[in-house]
Image (spheres, grey):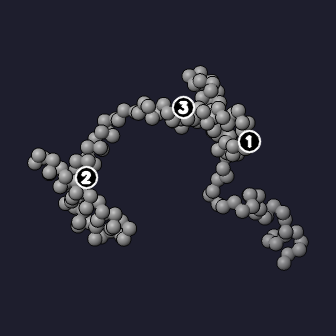
Amino acid sequence: MDRSGSGAGTGRVDDFLAHYGVRGMQWGVRKKSSSTVVTDRRGTPIRKNNTKLAPEAVKTRVNQAVAKKSGTDVLATKDLQELVNRMNLEQQYDRLNPTQKTTGQKAVDVLLTKVGPIAIKTIGPKLVDKLPEPYATAGKVAIEIASVIAVSQASKKKK
């Protein structure tokens, strides 16, 4: 070893590679953000300057985010009661005013109700034997249901 202070093995601090990461942290895994994003019912973040939302709705979303992050113990009884009342009212409103189906949803409904049973009856028996066990059983049940539906539809047409 060269002890003269020059060359390899000098022991200079600048020659070492050090890592000052978080202990136990996995490579490529990011730490979760500590900030909580408050969103409206559709998942859109609520901005402070958004004047379209009612103050009660914003307060409800903030209380919801706090309860989700820290539990309901951090909310005052009044805040928790307002949160539950608002959520119940929103659920009742959604039940009383169902959303209209889009054209795509209507097409999928027709496809599943009209074409689905026919496809299950024709292609299903060939594919069921190739499926792994939990899916094979479900496939056999689907084929039975499709045949029962076909029989009931045929009897309705005869009447």
Residue type at mark 2: give it. Answer: Gly
Q: Are marks 2 and 1 in contact (CB under 8 Å)?
A: no
Label ID, residue 150: none
At 80% from the left edge and 71% from the top edge, which residue is drawn?
A: 8
The residue beneath circle 2 is 116
Label ID, residue 74: 1
Asked if 92 appears above or below 119 in the picture, the reply is: above
Q: Quadrant of the N terminus?
A: bottom right
In primary-sequence order, the first of circles 1 and 3 is 1
Q: Which is more foreground, mark 2 or mark 3?
A: 3
Give percent across and percent down for residue 142: 29, 60
| Residue 138 in the figure: left or right of residue 18 | left
| Residue 6 in the figure: left or right of residue 107 | right
Residue type at mark 3: give it. Answer: Leu
* In the foreground, 131 or 151: 151
SS class of the residue under badge 1? helix
Label ID, residue 89: 3
| Residue 66 in the figure: left or right of residue 110 | right
At 48% from the left edge and 31% from the top edge, which residue is drawn?
A: 93
Residue type at mark 1: give it. Answer: Val
- Looking at the image, the residue that sits furthest to the left is 158
Q: Work out whether residue 36 can be spotted.
A: no
Q: Local crowd at mark 2 within 10 Å, few (<14), some, or many (≥20)?
A: few
Give percent across and percent down for residue 139: 30, 63
In primary-sequence order, the first of circles 2 and 3 is 3
Q: Are marks 1 and 3 in contact (CB under 8 Å)?
A: no
- Looking at the image, the residue that sits furthest to the bottom is 1
Give percent across and percent down for residue 32: 66, 50
At 63% from the left edge and 34% from the top edge, which residue is drawn?
A: 83
* In the foreground, 99 or 103: 99
Cα distance in 3D space between marks 1 and 3 = 23 Å
SS class of the residue under badge 3? helix
